[in-house]
Amino acid sequence: MGTVVIVGGGTGGAPAARSLRRKLGPEHRVIIIEKEKMPANLAVLPLYAVGKKGRRQVFRNRSLLKRHGVELIAGQVQKIDPAQKKVYTGQEEIGYDLLLIAAGAELDRSRPLGMAGAGFDLQSFAGVDEMRAALPHFQGTEIAIVVASTNIKCPGAPYEYALLLENWFYRQGRSRDISITVYTPEKAPLIMFGEKTSGAIAGLLLKRNIRVHPEAHVRLVDPGKKMIFLENDSFPYDMLLYYAAAAPPPFIRDSGLGGEEGWLKTDPHTMALQGLEDIYAVGDVTHVATPSGEALPKLGGVAHLQSFVAAANMAGLLKGENPGRAYSGFAA
């Protein structure tokens, strides 16, 4: 009998649990530790923001995993002890034979200064819900979308929000009066996916009269003056939407598992942690280097496919087999 513990029940953790439950017999336990009873699906938030999805379509009821024979523990992981093979939540300790870390990334809302108190958080349901309620009453003209870092979750989402908002105002007959600008530290929109993709996105944004301010390193947002300050320039806004930088969960650093920047470094093929055969990691919490040296982007599609690789290899280990499944590097 073996016990697999999964930290996080999101895009990576939930499919991994279902896959493991299908591959393993009833003598093995599969446990998910999830801090939120009803985690929000970030991929749906842009559509919810403009009324194309409802509240019930945003949240995932993780209790449904019990139907698959998955055990659920509500709690927030405080620390992992690889030597003792235990996970600590503050309320209890859970032992494991194999561990999958699929906790996702936290958000660093502290930078740039003033951003969090100036606008709507596009990565939280509360922030998007407030923005959705404010849109019909918006009387201004300048909408600013501030992207705090190149290291963000779902890097295409700021542009998706911009396009959906432009369409929303178009349907209200107000698109000619509204100016939407994305302030991004990227050299060009989604340049991480190559010049062809970046050029296509830039052309689509231009066609919809959405401005992009590239290499914009915002250092300060002043909500009183409604101004965005860059290194050598400043711009006004009437409504500010922000996309905070991704940050590793604190328990990774507290457990001594992360690299210098706090992310988990895994084998790019098997998804096992480097130097630890009994711990795997998938999704936003990882740093998986590509042949170019750049890290894989933090995308739900990446986490989803990695979860099946990790699950197959972990199930194989419990059956006495060598890990034989490899992640291809694709997101869909």
Image (tube, rainbow, N blue to C red):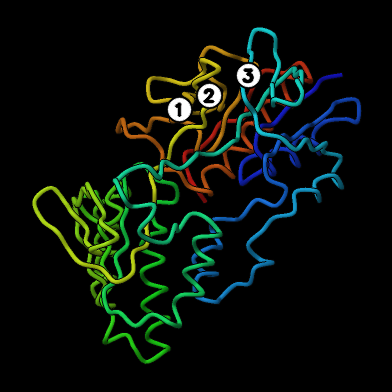
Alpha carbons under labels 1 and 2: distance apart: 8 Å
Q: Are marks 1 and 3 in contact (CB under 8 Å)?
A: no
Q: Is residue 285 visible?
A: yes
Q: Are marks 1 and 2 in contact (CB under 8 Å)?
A: yes
Residue 213 in the image: state x and y as whole percent: 19, 60
Among all residues in the image, which is located at the extreme right? Answer: 26
Residue 226 in the image: state x and y as whole percent: 25, 64
Q: Measured along the vertical axis of the image, is residue 277 above or below residue 129?
A: above
Q: Nearer the viewer, mark 1 or mark 2?
A: 2
- Residue 155 left/right relative to 46: left
Q: Which one is nearer the viewer's eye here, 97 or 237? A: 237
Q: Amino acid at mark 3?
A: Ile
- Name the residue tied to disc 2: 252
Q: Are marks 3 and 2 in contact (CB under 8 Å)?
A: no
Helix, strand or loop at mark 1:
loop
Give me the residue at 32% from left, 34% from top.
294
Helix, strand or loop at mark 3:
strand
- Crowd tier of the residue under label 2, counting other residues whose Cα lies within 10 Å: few below 14, some 14–19, many 20 or above: many
Q: Earlier in the sequence, mark 1 or mark 2?
A: 2
Give me the residue at 56% from left, 76% from top.
52
Among all residues in the image, which is located at the extreme left? Answer: 232
Q: Amino acid at mark 1?
A: Trp
- Name the residue tied to disc 1: 263
In the figure, residue 212 lies in which quadrant?
bottom left
- Residue 317 left/right relative to 28: left
- Residue 230 left/right relative to 48: left
- Crowd tier of the residue under label 1, counting other residues whose Cα lies within 10 Å: few below 14, some 14–19, many 20 or above: many
Give me the residue at 24% from left, 77% from top.
209
- Name the residue tied to disc 3: 80
